Amino acid sequence: MNVTRAALTATLLATLMPGRGEAAPVACVPGTLSDYFALSDGCTVGAFQFQNFAPLTTQPTGSSPISPNAVQVMPVASGLAFGVDVSASAGELLEILFGYDVTGSGIAGASLSLSGASAASDGAVTAVKNFCEGGRFDPGDVTGCTGTGDALIAAALDGLEDLNQSLTIFPIVALLGVVDDIAVDGGPDGSASLHGNVTNEFVAGANPVPEPASAVLVASGILGLLRSRARRVRHRTT
């Protein structure tokens, strides 16, 4: 790390990590995912507080990890965008999984959007948000939800289907455990790239009524994810 990079990192962490006696948390600011892993008190975006950022302790079989230093985190209107700039050729599977908690006086829904993805042949880019309503997952895992239920929403792009955004609505909670899974899979004979953002946003206040199109997007996303997962499993076993 050069002097300039070290100085920028120190400034970011000083902003994100208030000292003793100071009000916490502070507003979220741009940084790498590694910077967010180092947060001690979390940070806020609008009505939501984000904290307890951590990588999953087990990397999926057959995948190569995307470095958290290469993931850029940017606050958006009601959540966080995770910027990724990677490409996978045939036979490559690049993936990163990480968790965090969201708290607020009322969390009524969550959305996931994908931008800047491309895929050819049997390649695929997938983004999955697993969430635990009213509780947390086990540390470093996507199991053991302590809340009222857990579910997922997906955004995917592959040679057959393109789903850029998904939304789900649930009964209002004050805590939401989240695990994100971002994968860029070249497939056995294709290629894929992500030069854009995976954006996680959250719905505050009274429960809105989801439009029928939103429900279709969620269902389509899960089906697309399952198809992509099946292809990746076949890829790993061969």
Image: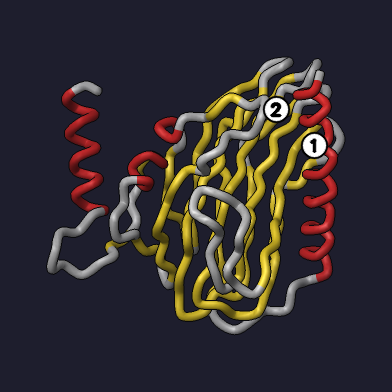
Give the camera-side residue of 37 and 148.
148
Farthest residue to the bottom: give it.
206
Q: Is residue 10 left or right of residue 119?
A: left
Mark before the other along the chain sequence, 1 or 2: 2
Q: Quadrant of the C terminus?
A: top right
The N terminus, quarter of image: top left
| Number of numbered tags placed on the structure image | 2
For the residue carrying disc 2, how many other residues have a C-alpha within 10 Å: few (<14), some (14-19), or many (20+)?
Answer: many
Residue 228 badge: 1
Badge 2 amino acid: Asp
Q: Answer with left or right where residue 142 lies relative to residue 220.
A: left
Q: Residue at x 42, y 51 (%)?
A: 53
Asked where in the image residue 200 lies, by quadrant, the reply is bottom right
Residue appearing at x 69%, y 25% in the figure? 192
Find residue 154 and report its horizontal and vertical position in percent: 71, 51
- Between 182 and 192, the one nearer to me in the picture: 182
Left or right of 68: which side holds 205?
right
Residue 120 in view: no
Report helix, strand or loop for mark 1: helix
Q: Is residue 67 above or below residue 13?
A: above
The span from disc 1 to disc 2 (Cα, nearest Å) is 9 Å
**Do callouts 1 and 2 mark residues in contact (Cβ within 8 Å)?**
yes
Q: Position of residue 140 (x, y in %)?
A: 51, 48
* Mark linked to residue 185: 2
- How crowded pointer 1 is (Cα within 10 Å; few <14, some 14-19, many 20+) is rated as many
